[in-house]
Amino acid sequence: MPVTITSQDVIKRPWTGLGIGWDAETKDSDPIKLTDDQWQTLFRRMDYMHPAWIRSMIDISWFCPDGRVGSYNFASPTMQAWYPILDYTKSHHIPIMLGTWGDQPWGFHSQGYATALTDLLQYLIHERGYTNIHFFNGPNEPDSRLPDFETWWNGASYFQSMLAQRGLKDQVSLVGPDTSWTNGWITESDLPSKASSILGAYEWHYYERTCCNIRDGQVENYLRPIVERLAGPEQPDAKTKQVLLGEMGWGYQMGPGDNQFQVKGYQYGVEMADFALQATRAGISGAAAWNLDDAMHNKTWGMWNITDEPDIRPWFYSWALLSRYFPSGATLYRPNSPAPTLRLIAAQVHSPQQTGWSIALVNRGDATANVKLKLPDASGQQLFSSYVYSDKFRPSNLYGLPLPAARTPLQAGNSVDVQVPANSLLVVSNLDQDWTGE
């Protein structure tokens, strides 16, 4: 099946990239003291994934235990358990989206909340040097705790004014509304007209809870008009406001207690890869998968549980490939698919570190798809690596990190022939050719 990628396929929106939710390992109780080996395991896996951004959430009680503005303990045990995450993201220049799980004891629209959180931002940025904190999303899923959109809007406006008063406006962008996506704030409220002036990016959560909307390609159709409603038409200079998914996951057949045990199986990795490709094709600027580690919240949603089940679960493999080979700032393409069961997205990378192409293909069919990819140019190395996420074949090194299944030279006419197994993901790239898995 021929796929020709042309300039007409460019997505004229900013590309922030794929990220992950990474909170302090506390199991929603007391901070867990990880061993040096456990930290190194986490860092090694994050080194490979190379997430474009991290959404990290905290409880106000971590630094303000008695609920009095100005009475802070920035050296509490839980804050100390959180700082290694911020240290890692700082040293690797990974942007942080910071938020709080609740707004108590003050309320989002209150002076207490705005003052305490801007005090925290001042401390983190100016005293600890976490200048990679770029976004603040306020309280998690405010539609579950606030009476209506207007209440959130008033709180967001006040918080934005506090960022300006404290000299943080140019450092930290307020994003949101961070809703659980089922409420109408995203699709029916005055969000674009009211909030466009105070939000640095639109952001909310999207869990696809059906069996088959991802498989049948309905996510792209659902998201595209929402993106256009919020950010407007695509612009040639790609300067439209970012539209982000702060949490995303496949919520079909969740277990009791907000657990998704399907994260332990192979199919979850296919669904999440397909989900990401469709969201990207719809114009989403970036998405953070929920989540990294079950040890964060004592719920089964992660890529592992570093304390109890430290082995990598399959979906890390597919998400890490997409995060690594579709970096922030790339130019994205959405070529037409030659078959309804085949989803694909392409990225052209021009950075000081590397130049080249990545193409991701998800095959939802029952048979192997043979595809001839034709690129607009031959930028980058002439050798392409193929990474396969399939039920029976996904090469990895001794740490469980993906290895190339094959290396193929670019053919005449800037084309590459690939095979995508049934119900699988294939990532083809001429970036990062020095990766040997060691």
Image (cartoon, grey):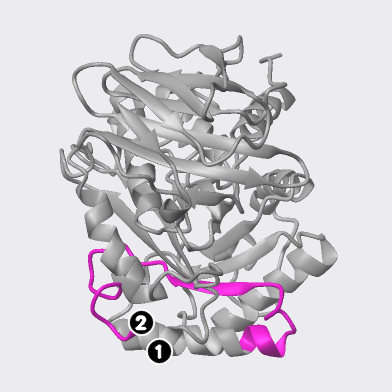
On the image, the x and y values in percent for residue 363 come to 29, 27
Residue at x 71% of width, y 13% of height: 438
Instruction: Give SS at disc 2.
Output: helix
The boundaries of the magenta stretch are 162-191
Q: Where 327 sits versus 202, above or below?
A: above
Q: With 378 as the anchor, is 332 left or right in this view?
A: left
Residue at 48% x, 58% y is: 285
State the image coordinates of residue 412 (x, y, percent, origin top left). Answer: 54, 23
Q: Residues within 10 Å of mark 1 (few under 14, many from 20)?
A: few
Instruction: Pick out the residue farthest to the front.
Output: 413
Left/right placement of residue 361 relative to residue 116 reads left
Q: Which mark is residue 194?
A: 1
Q: Give x and y (percent) for residue 393.
A: 40, 10
Q: Nearer the viewer, residue 72 or 429?
A: 429
The residue depicted at 27 percent of the width and 52 percent of the height is 220
Whether 174 is among the magenta residues is: yes
- The rendered magenta stretch, by its main secondary structure, is classed as loop
- Establish if 37 lies above or below 323: above
Q: Note whether 192 is above or below 280 in the view shown.
A: below
Residues at discs 1 and 2 in contact (Cβ within 8 Å) = yes
Nearer to us in this view, 21 or 258: 21
Circle number at residue 191: 2
What residue type is disc 1 on?
Lys
Helix, strand or loop for disc 1: helix
- Residue 304 seen from this side: no
